Amino acid sequence: MSKKIKKSDLIDQLVKSLDDRHWDLFSQLVGRELNRAPTSKANFLNSLFKKTIAVSSRKGKGRSLQKWTCEKISELTGIPWGNEDDCEITSRPMGQQGPDVILSPRVRQLFALTPECKNQETWKLESYIKQAKANCYPDTDWLVIMTKNGHEEVVVLDGNSFFKLLKGVNQIV
């Protein structure tokens, strides 16, 4: 039985064995000059063999954040959430257009924000805000809720909306 070799050791062997002619070919393939420093070469080779997450797993990650958001809105409003047709707070099925969390008019009276949920390892805040604005319910403000593996949930909203919320909280206290 052969001994298993670590990926990093194989990458190091590749970096040492490939000459300038090989790196010229890689540069042509990617359409840009590649840095010839050993660390840069290793990073480039690592990127070629990087595992990508399956579509079903990506959708599962997104669905889990949507459900987390539904639960938090439910706790805040006292209105139960679920995936049945008669629920006033539901998670939108993957692939459908519109807000990620479906809120009844009654819920929107209590929670005047339209959440856009993003559970991704690379954050593209400008595009998230654009999508949140496009999917916003009438008479609500947009809200982006995002997270990634090993990271707590982060909320982004318009500055005026933030201070409007704080003003409302201070009036209650």
Image: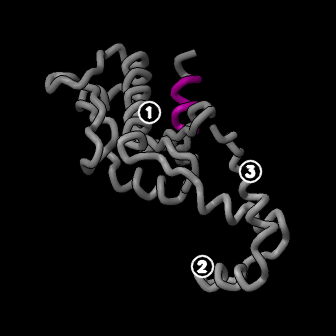
> Residue lying farthest front?
1
Which of disc 2 and disc 1 is earlier in sequence? 2
Image quarter in which the N terminus is found: top right
Across and down, in percent, residue 36 comes to 81, 75
Residue type beneath disc 1: Leu
Q: Residue at x 57, y 39 (%)?
A: 148
Whether residue 138 is visible here, answered yes or no, is: no
- Residue 43 vs residue 117, the one in the foreground: 43
Magenta stretch mostly in which secondary structure? helix
Q: Which residue matches tag 1?
A: 65
Give the alpha-carbon distance from disc 2 to disc 3, as whole Å: 22 Å
Foreground tag (1 vs 2): 2
Question: Is 136 displayed left or right of 124 in the figure?
Answer: left
Which of disc 3 and disc 1 is earlier in sequence? 3
Q: Which residue matches tag 2?
A: 30
Colour scheme of this structure image? one colour
Q: Is residue 77 above or below residue 111?
A: above
Q: Is residue 12 above or below residue 36?
A: above
Is 163 included in the stretch rendered in magenta? yes
The local secondary structure at tag 2 comes to helix
> Residue lying farthest right?
37
Disc 2 residue crowd, few under 14, some 14–19, many 20+, Cα 10 Å: few
Across and down, in percent, residue 171 comes to 54, 22
| Segment tinted magenta in the rendering | 162-170
Residue type beneath disc 3: Ser
Across and down, in percent, residue 150 comes to 62, 32
Disc 1 residue crowd, few under 14, some 14–19, many 20+, Cα 10 Å: many
Disc 3 residue crowd, few under 14, some 14–19, many 20+, Cα 10 Å: few
Q: Which residue matches tag 3?
A: 8
Q: Residue at x 67, y 58 (%)?
A: 46
Q: Residue at x 72, y 79 (%)?
A: 23
- Residue 30 vs residue 138, the one in the foreground: 30
